[in-house]
Structure formats: structure tokens, C-alpha cells
């Protein structure tokens, strides 16, 4: 015989914890992906790539030669002063993303400014896939 007084209960606390953890995970991953692809650059292809570290300062050069530091437009003269504290905070590693059809001379000038601002190592942005 069953006891009519004992009902089945369900504890919602563990389910709420899991839902909140999933929500936090999706918020973090969606914001990181948006930052990486904020500028429409046609990056060169490489057969092997390394995932970008979100804490790196990212300098981008588009096809027309406009410069961006972490997604905000800047100029070549302002880039060094803006980049210096960011490069020291990242241990001298700076990300460089340049459009493959852009001006090579502009990219070399940007690399020179990065070096003078304390950028000891460059993390070059590429697309996955060879040829």
C-alpha cells in the first residue's frame, strides 16, 4: 500500500545553477567572438593557426590603410602612445591583423610603431585554410 501523505518533490536549485552557468558561458563566448571579428578584414590564409588571446591589444589595418586599436579607429601618429601601456600589460605581445589586399608599406610602418611602443612579439591574424 502507498502512503497518500508522501508526495513526490523536485528540487529546482541544481537545475537553476546549471542554467545560470550555461548563461554565463554563452555570454562570455559571444562577446569574445564579436571582438575578434569586429572589423571586416580579408585576412591572409595559413594552413596552421593559433587561437587569439583575448587580453592582447589588437592592431588592425583595413584595405584602405585605416588603423584600428582594439576596434577603435586611430592614426599612425597616435598609435604608439595608445599602444605603449597595452603592450607592457600584455608582456610585449601585440596582435596584428591586416587585410591581405592592403598596402604592404602601411603594415610595415605599423610594425615599426608597434616595436617602438614596446611590442616585442607579434601575433599575426590569419584565416584557417591553405592556398
Image: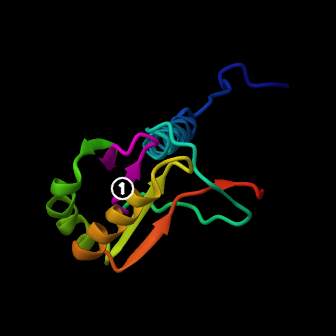
Q: For the point 16% across and 54% down, which residue is it?
A: 78
Q: Position of residue 9 (x, y in %)?
A: 62, 28
Give the quadrant of the C terminus: bottom right
Q: Is residue 64 magenta?
A: yes
Give the quadrant of the N terminus: top right
How many numbered marks have been drawn onto this rendered protein structure?
1
Q: Position of residue 89 (x, y in %)?
A: 25, 71
Q: Is residue 129 left or right of residue 14?
A: right
Q: State the image quarter where residue 119 is shown.
A: bottom left
Is residue 45 visible to the viewer in this orientation of the structure? yes
Q: Nearer the viewer, residue 37 or 1?
A: 37
Q: For the point 22% across and 62% down, which residue is it?
A: 83
Most extreme residue toward the top is: 4
- The part of the chain drawn in magenta is 56-70
Q: For the point 77% across and 58% down, which residue is it?
A: 130
Up the image or down, 130 lies above or below 27; here it is below
Q: Nearer the viewer, residue 128 or 17?
A: 128
Is residue 118 visible to the viewer in this orientation of the structure? no
Q: State the image quarter where residue 112 is shown.
A: bottom left
Q: Position of residue 103 (x, y in %)?
A: 45, 51
Badge 1 crowding class, 10 Å Cα cut-off, few under 14, some 14 to 19, many 20 or more, is many
Snapshot colouring: rainbow
Up the image or down, 68 lies above or below 125; here it is above
Q: Is residue 121 magenta?
A: no
Q: Is residue 104 left or right of residue 55?
A: right
Q: Residue beneath label 1, please? A: 59
Q: For the point 39% across and 65% down, which residue is it?
A: 108
Up the image or down, 28 lies above or below 109; here it is above
Q: Position of residue 98 (x, y in %)?
A: 47, 53
Amino acid at each position: 500500500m502507498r502512503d497518500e501523505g508522501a508526495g513526490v518533490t523536485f528540487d529546482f536549485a541544481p537545475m537553476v545553477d546549471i542554467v545560470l552557468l550555461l548563461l554565463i558561458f554563452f555570454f562570455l563566448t559571444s562577446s569574445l567572438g564579436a571582438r575578434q571579428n569586429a572589423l571586416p578584414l580579408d585576412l591572409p590564409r595559413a594552413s596552421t593557426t593559433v587561437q587569439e588571446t583575448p587580453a592582447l591589444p589588437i592592431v588592425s589595418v583595413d584595405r584602405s590603410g585605416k588603423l584600428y586599436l582594439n576596434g577603435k579607429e586611430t592614426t599612425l601618429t597616435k598609435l604608439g602612445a595608445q599602444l605603449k601601456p597595452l603592450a607592457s600589460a600584455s608582456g610585449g605581445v601585440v596582435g596584428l591583423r591586416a587585410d591581405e589586399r592592403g598596402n604592404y608599406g602601411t603594415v610595415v610602418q605599423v610594425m615599426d610603431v608597434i616595436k617602438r611602443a614596446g611590442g616585442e612579439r607579434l601575433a599575426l591574424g590569419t584565416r584557417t585554410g591553405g592556398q
